[in-house]
Amino acid sequence: MNNNWASTYLEQFQLPNTVDEAAGQLILILGNGQKTSLLSMQEEDLVNLHFGLGMTIRNVYQLHQLDSKLMASCGGPMHPDDVSAMIIKKLWQKLQDKS
């Protein structure tokens, strides 16, 4: 579920400030095959993306940075793992809404 979008990400996008913005960017970045794969998953299976897509999200969106606006927008101290899970879930919901 992970391609090499991380290397070209910052050339085309600014870091998102909200979970919704992050999910919207991912819809533009991910390939059709990745979106189809994600769309076919059950919500309870999204946790399986933690070490692939989730890790890439945490790294590219710099969720380990103390001054992350994206982390701050989540309403309090949160772990980067939790925020990447929120982004994946929002992405999944957006894809479900489109289909």
Image: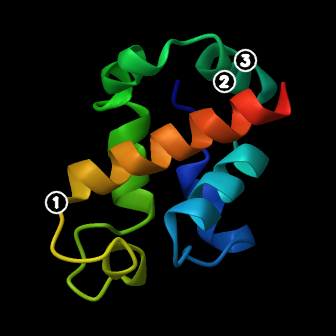
Q: Residue furthest bottom?
A: 67
Q: Disc 1 vs disc 2: which is toward the camera?
A: 1
Kindly indicate the quadrant of the structure image that contains residue 83.
bottom left
Tell me residue 97's x, y (percent): 77, 34
Question: Of the residues under marks 1 and 3, which one precedes in the sequence?
Answer: 3
From the image, tell me which residue sits under label 2. 34
Residue 11 is left or right of residue 6, and the answer is right
Q: Amino acid at mark 1?
A: His
Residue 4 shows in the view:
no
**Residue ID at (22%, 68%):** 64
From the image, tell me which residue sits under label 3. 36
Residue 65 shows in the view:
yes
Q: Residues within 10 Å of mark 1 (few under 14, many from 20)?
A: few
Q: Amino acid at mark 2?
A: Gln
Q: CA distance from mark 1 to mark 2?
A: 25 Å
Kindly indicate the quadrant of the structure image that contains residue 48.
top left
Q: CA distance from mark 1 to mark 3?
A: 28 Å
Kindly indicate the quadrant of the structure image that contains residue 33.
top right
Residues at badges 3 and 2 in contact (C-beta under 8 Å)?
Answer: yes
Q: Which mark is residue 9?
A: none
| Along the line of sight, the residue nearer the viewer: 70 or 7 | 70
Q: Amino acid at mark 3?
A: Thr
Q: Is residue 25 above or below residue 97?
A: below
Task: Name the secondary structure under disc 1.
Answer: loop
Tell me residue 6's x, y (percent): 54, 52
Task: Name the secondary structure under disc 2.
Answer: helix
**Which scheme is used to colour this image of the protein?**
rainbow
